[in-house]
Amino acid sequence: MIIDFSIENFLSFKEQQTLSFVAEPPYDIHPEHLLDTPEKDLKLLKTIVIYGANASGKSNFLSAIHFLKQLILKSAENKPDEKFDLIPFLLDKELKNSATSFDINFFCNEIRYNYSLVLDKSQVFHEHLNYYPKKYKKNIFSRDLNNLGEYEYSIGTDLKPKRIYEDTALKTLPNVLFLSKMVQENSQFLKPIYDWFSNTLSEQFSLEDTAKSIHSDENFKKRFLKFLENQDIDIVDINVDKGSLAEQIIKNNNFTPEVQEKILEDLKNRYYYDIKTYHRNSDNELEPFDLELESQGTRKLFALSSLLLNNYKKFEKTFYVDELSSALHPLLVKNFLKEFNHTTFNQLICVTHDTHLINQECLRKDQIYFVEKDKSQVSSLYSLLEFNPRNDRENWELRYLSGRYGATPFFG
């Protein structure tokens, strides 16, 4: 679970900005929207919804999460002198050549961790990983570039044997994260942290995820059809056939035997899923449809359903989704978030323009964030909490649309 995430000098975000999942009292308002944590006095939000005008920088914040994830997963593969695919705030002459910082607090296996990173396109300046095994801060490792251009490492007592970590530190390139390098070197202590970024922090939801579950799990299929019924989608049945992707490609093309053999080898564990939906015709008979004949909104709902219906409780995933409401009716978006808040043990960060959600019935005030871009093209992220809105009287949506909270288009 994410506790909070901060960035500085990334894309349109110039100054440090923080997105916090920490729930603010009172906790009796939408208690179903909250997650208990290993720390007794700390509750976290299940969902955060981000609003703002077009091109305000909303998606850039999600891009920062994704960028950090990919750095951790892939930087160990970097070649010497390979640049990070990093874009700082470019409209400031000093900042465009300055470092970018990331800081994330999260729970992994019931323990709080903090990971902080400062880097530019060429090298890492600062990389620290701490944790709180008994609620007290403990250093796992730290890495800092000194004024002589040399790295100073501090290897915590829990990294054993220490000599292996110290030797690997000396071999870690300036454009490689130490966390990534040590996992590549089979560090069992750091592997759960790496896996948290790989598996728990996820933007992945797709038709294929849903199709796999329908094909392999009859109970999932029943829940899925019930979910569609609750959304007023008139699909009464669904069937998914699974086949070899390599054989499908070969069947539809005239390849030489050598090419066919290579395709079979390269794609030997890859599959395609053929989805058929069924509607009732005028004679009350089931009529099959290819999924492509369903609306864009229905297909998106198919993909989103995997966030709700798969059993992610064990993994406690955190999803980040851009343009949640695109192609979906506002009532479907509202019902989706209601289902997510009531039935899952996961977290969701989403960007949307659907202002119907900005009310006390749908969300707590600490679940609503805004992004606004000023005349200097600098984006700022802030919470509805900063305006201290009344729960009982104020119409949050109307006040937002009238400009009281900012983050709306300016028409000159």
Image: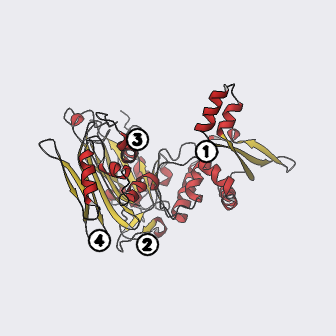
Residue kind at label 2, given as amino acid type: Asp
**Which residue is identified by label 3?**
53
Is tag 4's residue or tag 1's residue first in the polypeptide sequence? 4
Q: Quarter-wise, where is residue 8 in the image? A: top left
User: Closest to the observer: 386 or 33?
Assistant: 33
**Which residue is identified by label 1?**
269
Q: Under tag 4, what secondary structure?
A: loop
Residue at mark 1 to residue at mark 3: CA–CA distance: 43 Å
Is tag 2's residue or tag 4's residue first in the polypeptide sequence? 2
Mark 3 or mark 4, whichever is nearer to me: 4
Residue 185 drawn above or below residue 391: above
| Quadrant placement of the N terminus | bottom left
User: Closest to the observer: 272 or 166?
Assistant: 166
Q: Under tag 1, what secondary structure?
A: loop
Residue at mark 2 to residue at mark 4: CA–CA distance: 26 Å
Q: Residue, x 54% and y 43% (percent of image)?
A: 326
**Which residue is identified by label 2?**
28
Q: Are marks 3 and 4 in contact (CB under 8 Å)?
A: no
**Which residue is identified by label 4?**
135
Disc assigned to residue 409? none
The 10 Å Cα crowd at callout 2, few under 14, some 14 to 19, many 20 or more, is few
Residue kind at label 1, given as amino acid type: Asn
Mark 1 or mark 3, whichever is nearer to me: 1
**From this viewpoint, which residue is outermost toward the left?**
148
The 10 Å Cα crowd at callout 4, few under 14, some 14 to 19, many 20 or more, is few
Residue 345 drawn above or below residue 209: below
Is tag 3's residue or tag 2's residue first in the polypeptide sequence? 2
Q: Are marks 4 and 1 in contact (CB under 8 Å)?
A: no
Is tag 3's residue or tag 4's residue first in the polypeptide sequence? 3
